[in-house]
Amino acid sequence: MSYAADDLDDGLDYAVEEDHVVVEEAEDGDVVESDDNHLENEETDKKRPLEEDKKDDDGEGKTLSKRQKKLAKSSLHQKKLERMEYERSQKKNLPKSSVDQIVEYLATLIREKNPDLSALELDELYFKKQDFLSTERYEKERSLSNFQDFINTFSKAPRAIILSLSNLRVADVYRSVNGHQNAVKLFSKNKFKDDLTRVEDLLGSSSKDAKGNNNNNNNNNKKNNKNNKKGKGAAAADKGKPQDIKYFISTPTRLLKLIENTELFFQGKEKLDIFIDASYLDPKNNTIFTADDFAVLCKVLKEFRKKKSSVKILLF
């Protein structure tokens, strides 16, 4: 009995076809598996050289990176040096600027130091153009060797205050103006009570002399008695007396403490010049304006402008 292939209901095709299908399935499976393995192998093969290339590239990259970092660091360092030199030059040359530029520069510093203050509060801290005397026309180098010449060029007042950044700078300025003859150093190397006593002796004597004008006869008698005792030695003894002192050289901090304890600096109607040693830069490239005592300096200057008539501020 023969059956047609279509009559078979066993769910199977011809054996040949079944084999073919199985083979095909097997082949497909193998192909797929083979393809998968092959792809994986290819991917592995591809990955390996890529990874090796990457390693090689990374190796080269690291070498280049070090070089690039070195170059970048060198470039940044150079830019930093250039910026520092520019800022240094700007600070050092500020005294040569116009009064308008000086006032604007100080206003910028005041705003930076007081970010929380209102515009009205800041306005009270700002300086005005009339507070300063321009020194633009001074063409010589602003060095210690020219300090005395600078003062002689601009100062017309009988006495002057010189404000410097540090104790060491105070001592240097003192020597540059022949301070042993006509100046006193007021700084933290001295005991405060000694500085206060010195100021009272120097400035207090002026007011005492003014009051003593009503008693000329008594003064003349005292002078005659001194002359009788000292004779020719009187002229030598006069050297270094209060009337010979012209310069009070100080730091902002010490001067603030002094004016908080005596009003003698503000007495009298004579002119007073305040020289700010502004062109000097310390080892950290700070000036007296960019140092930590800037707020103290501003307070001192404001106090003098407020309490003393005929005060002018000059930048050296």
Image (spheres, grey):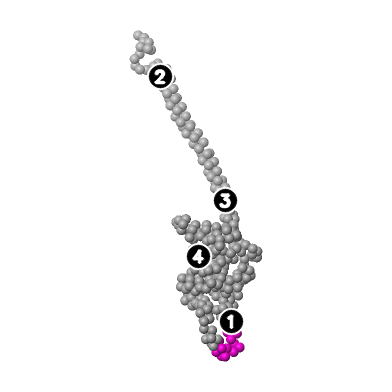
User: Which label lies toward us, 4 or 2?
Assistant: 4
In the picture as drawn, the residue positioned furthest to the bottom comes out as: 228
- Which residue lies under the disc numbered 3? 72
Q: Are marks 2 and 1 in contact (CB under 8 Å)?
A: no
Per the image, is 301 magenta? no
Residue 22 image point, x, y percent: 41, 22
* Secondary structure of the residue carrying numbered label 2: helix
Q: Which of labels 2 and 1 is toward the front?
A: 1
How crowded pointer 4 is (Cα within 10 Å; few <14, some 14-19, many 20+) is rated as some
Q: Earlier in the sequence, mark 4 or mark 1?
A: 1
**Residue kind at label 3, given as amino acid type:** Ala
Secondary structure under badge 4? helix
Precedes in sequence: disc 2 or disc 1? 2
Q: Is 82 above or below relative to 201?
A: above
Residue shown at 46% from the left, 58% from the top: 121
Q: Which residue in the structure is indicated by mark 2?
A: 18
Task: Answer with mark 1 or mark 3, whichever residue precedes in sequence.
Answer: 3
Residue placed at 53% from the left, 61% from the top? 128
Identify the residue under disc 1.
239
